[in-house]
Amino acid sequence: MASSFGQLFRITTWGESHGGGVGVIVDGCPPRLKLSEADIQPDLDRRRPGQSKIVTPRKESDTVQIMSGISMTGKTLGTPICLWVKNEDARSEAYSEMKDKFRPSHADYTYFAKYGIRAWQGGGRASARETVGRVAAGAIAKKILREKFGVEILAYVKQVQKIIGEVNPDAVKLSEIEANIVRCPDAAAAGRMIRLIEKIRNEGNTVGGIVEGVARGVPAGWGEPVFDKLEADLAKAMLSLPACKGFESGSGFGGILLTGREHNDAFRAKSGKVFTTTNRSGGIQGGISNGETIFFRTAFKPVATVMHEQATVTEQFKNTTLKGRGRHDPCVLPRAVPMVEAMTALVLVDHALRQKAQCG
């Protein structure tokens, strides 16, 4: 139920942070798509912990295994694809104090209030470890979009606290994003971001910011009117990610500073193709893609685990204090980049298949 996402291209993630492993079931993947672990592993490598000095030092290879849904010739069968990643470096003892205490601003208390039980080791399903399955499934979705529809999906760190990168969503390249450990294509801003994150980490604190997502090559016509608008599904996808607290597409909240005349994207036509002279709509109008670059921004809060004593309560609702322990990201943004790309791909591939099913 709550662990499934999508309609025609549907995923169900499973596993806990400190269990035997994590993974995903992908249902609805078109048949005859050439697929192997090598298509999925690069995105998991970009998401995995321990990849740089500004992320959690937890050491996980995040090696993916395809358990079902692939023929002996390496093509999808059209049947459910099961992807599994083993947990290799879980250290539950680091969370022993959290067994009876709720960590401030984590999901500990709310999970307990809902279920009356919780996986206190690392947060269970509320951990960012759950996103392994999303990123693995997203890699398949990206491959379909790229090969069948000519769609390219990218994401990058746009802002860390008050440091803002200057990036052109129509021209940014993957090589520019991957050129530094913070994944900001603006090299000058990236250097300042890295120094800030290191400073914050040394203080036992955390910091948040913004990841911008981009989809280029999306044809006009994807998306459903009213409840399944393209930006509505993108918003749900992004806000389902751990630590994501905000979403805006196109001009977003900044659009309120403009008048209607200033904000409107004028239409023109050339060689039988319709285009807009500006793109304040972010490639979506009326909930349906208009053929321009889709772009949006997602806000991620500072990671809730800080290495300072804070007030909290026990499972018996007694007042106490708790100091953060264990291995955690001082800033989630660099590892959130492949997560944002994955959720974008899952939304778009689902709408691509829905469009083809309804309109041919």
Image: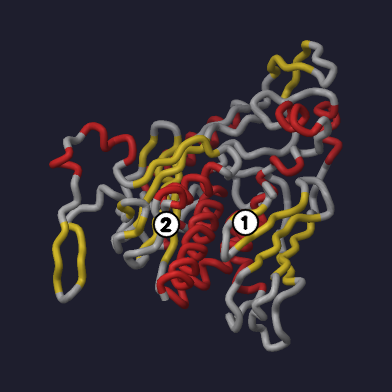
Residue 175: x %, y % from top left: 43, 63
**Along the line of sight, the residue nearer the viewer: 195 or 332:** 332
Chain-order first, disc 1 or disc 2: 1
Above or below: residue 255 compared with residue 73: above
Q: Quadrant of residue 220?
A: bottom left
Q: Quadrant of residue 306?
A: top right
Q: Nearer the viewer, mark 1 or mark 2?
A: 2
Mark number, residue 30 = none
Above or below: residue 279 compared with residue 331: below
Left or right: 38, with 61 as reference point: left
Residue 88: x %, y % from top left: 80, 54
Residue 86: x %, y % from top left: 79, 59
Residue 192: x %, y % from top left: 42, 39
Residue at 68% from the left image edge and 88% from the top image edge? 73
Separation of disc 1 and disc 2 at Cα? Answer: 23 Å
Amino acid found under the numbered disc labelled 1: Arg
**Which residue appears farthest toward the top when viewing the image?**
319
**Colour convention of the picture:** secondary structure
Callout 2 crowding tier (Cα within 10 Å): few <14, some 14–19, many ≥20? some
**Which residue appears farthest toward the bottom when viewing the image?**
73
Left or right: 298, with 268 as reference point: right
Above or below: residue 97 compared with residue 67: above
Residue at 75% from the left image edge and 35% from the top image edge? 326
Callout 1 crowding tier (Cα within 10 Å): few <14, some 14–19, many ≥20? many
Mark number, residue 134 = 1
Residue at 62% from the left image edge and 78% from the top image edge? 35
Q: Secondary structure at mark 2?
A: loop
**Along the line of sight, the residue nearer the viewer: 267 or 119:** 267
- Give the labeled residue for mark 2: 224
Amino acid found under the numbered disc labelled 2: Glu
Residue at 17% from the left image edge and 39% from the top image edge? 260
